[in-house]
Amino acid sequence: MYELVWKGSGYRIVSSPSRTDTVAVVPRTVSAHPYDHRELDLSVWKKFVRTGRSDLTELSDPIRQSWHRCREMGVNPGHGKCWDIRNEPELGEDFRILRELVQETRDQIYSLVRGKGLLVTVSDRRGYLVGMCGDYDTLLMADRLNFGPGANWSEKSVGTNAIGTALASGQAIRVTGCEHFCESHHGWICSAAPFYDIRGEVVGCIDISGPKTSDHSQALALAIEGARAIESRLFKSGALDFQQQSTRLLKAVFNAVRTGLVFLDTGGTIKAANPKASALLASDNDQLVGMAADNFFRIEKLSRLLTAESRSREHSGILLPHRSRATLRARAFPVLSRNHVPAGVLLVLEERQPKRVSISKTAVAATDPFSRIIGHSRVLHSTVDIARRIAALSTTVLITGDSGTGKDVLARAIHEASPRAAGPFVAVNCGAIPADLIQSTLFGYVEGAFTGAHRKGRRGQFEAASGGTLLLDEIAEMPLPMQVNLLRVLEEARITRVGGTKPIAVDVRVIAATNKDLEEETRQGRFRQDLFYRLNVVRINMPPLRQRGKDILLLANHFINEFSTKMHRRLRRVEADFYDLLTAYPWPGNVRELRHAMESAVALMPSDVLSKENLPEYILRAVPTVGGNSVSEPSFNLENLQREAILGAHAYFRGNITRMAGALGIGRNTLYAKLKKFGIVSS
């Protein structure tokens, strides 16, 4: 085996006998062994580097994107010889540690290419070469390009190449001939695969390169195999470091969780168990560690978690029955690396209670998510009935209704009544996110996607809701350019982070909500018709409060009890005229407005009796005197009612625009316009 090493002012090829075979390797000439491939027409490359435009349909997406990056970075296609070469002390501690790891595994790595006329190179995450070994003649050719330890083979340094492009795209890749951006590399074929540490972060990549005449038939597969070999070592060392750094935290979490947790290695051996699990399994922790999980659970199906099926089971897991206790079972979840390689299994123990003969109505109500939607009116009952019927399905739901009717409460009830109840419920107000941030908010972004981006990137709300439900509230406010991206995600169940290229599968049920007429918005060109059809699979309308009759009094009593308890106010009686005025008022802000009005009334109640005088002033002015002493006919002028409502909200919230807009159920910009129109604030 031969290695290219940095010596003084240049590279030197040295013979490095294997630890298991100390016989020196004799330099040889590799016989011609062309790899069976179809090369890109050189004219395509020439036209692109000259004009920036060409027919790139024959290029894969990663290489096409790399060519564009190279032009943007100003890489000179006529060059290619690396001039960014650094000594080990300049490259930092991570480089040194990776170099030691490569030294430990060089025999295993070299075995991948022995006799193929190739060389193997390992780089760090920045593209600096850590070490390389291979055949003598190939190393000589590499030396002419400064392709050796300490050299920077990122795209910015030497253009499109397997190392730099694999690191940039995060995926294994082959770059053939004139697919390289720099002309001096056109005689080479390179295959590279990135490898990750235990935290899922890129550490570097392994590259197998050689002239076109070498045997590249298995190069990409061998690069991937080499990456997994290094990754296995990193996992072992990373696991040890992680264990040393986080033992106390893990023990605290394990001890605090009231659910039994057991961690197994890939062989089914128990590596850790929390106190709750020890109690459920009737064994001391010291006894459990090292035992086979098969002693307790039927783990025949466990192998399915350690195969290609593991990704589909990442969120749902599989059930493992206990061997002797019918009421105890475990749900097994795969613990996967960034490359979806199984690293172990987490068992979540579930102890089921014996079935009872009868269950009280109170207990049933407590477990019914729809019990939080208060009201007995026929129109509300019809709405809830539809929601119950579709809760167990995975279909997309569109909830319509005026602002403040409780669309978000209905959406959460649907989620909690669905098979996804154990998953997350994530609500996003599309109207409250600036247009330039909505894409990164929903889909996330990768490291360096834009100025101010988090160093490690950030997942979006679709990923956060995976396995559960995503509520897209105020969907009509979503900008048109963003609507096509949302449509694509709904159709493909995959997202791509801003600045990234790798599709990420998401398992999300989408519920959309709006207070606008989407059909009219579509006709006016403010909402995409195809997205409307995709969202409008099942439509549920939340009725306005004015149509719900005596539900107003049920809700009012609920809020009065809630706020009197919260404010520690003793309530002895509610006067009849208080209720009369509530039923006479039209409640344009619906349930939200009623809630705030009851909070205000309880807060302003001077004694232990609630009367109409405790209601907000704008309600008193908007409704005629009740109780048979009406002094004038009520005004039904909508503009006057609007003005009175806004005046009342302005007084109650002391001019706080955000709280006023929320209580009135309108946008901030709309509220500003009406404040100026009614002369409540100066322009």
Image: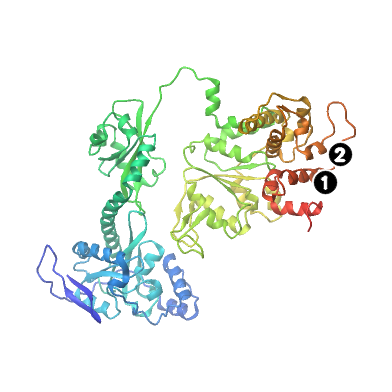
> What numbered label is drawn on residue 635?
2
Residue 447 placement: quadrant: bottom left
Q: Position of residue 116 (x, y in %)?
A: 22, 69
Q: Position of residue 163 (x, y in %)?
A: 34, 68
- Residue that extends furthest to the right in the rendered view of this protein: 632
Q: How is the image coloured?
A: rainbow
| For residue 369, side relative to residue 673 (left or right) | left
Q: Position of residue 441 (x, y in %)?
A: 54, 54
Do the residues bearing badges 2 and 1 touch, measured as CB atoms within 8 Å? no
Where 319 falls versus 151 (above or below)? above
Check the picture and name the quadrant holding the N terminus.
Answer: bottom left
Query: Mark 2: few, some, or many residues within 10 Å (few <14, many ≥20)?
Result: few
| For residue 285, side relative to residue 670 (left or right) | left
- Residue that extends furthest to the top in the rendered view of this protein: 357
Check the picture and name the quadrant holding the C terminus.
Answer: bottom right
- Residue 206 visible? The answer is no
> What numbered label is drawn on residue 492?
none
Closer to us: 654 or 3: 654
Q: What secondary structure is marked by label 1?
A: helix
Closer to us: 57 or 549: 549
Residue 133 placement: quadrant: bottom left
Where 436 falls versus 649 (above or below)? below
Q: What secondary structure is marked by label 2?
A: loop
Residue visible at 61% across and 57% down in the picture: 434
Amino acid of disc 2: Ser
Distance (Cα) linking label 2 and label 1: 10 Å
Q: Position of residue 16 (x, y in %)?
A: 15, 70
Residue 112 placement: quadrant: bottom left
> What numbered label is drawn on residue 639?
1
Where 56 falls versus 601 (above or below)? below
Amino acid of disc 1: Glu
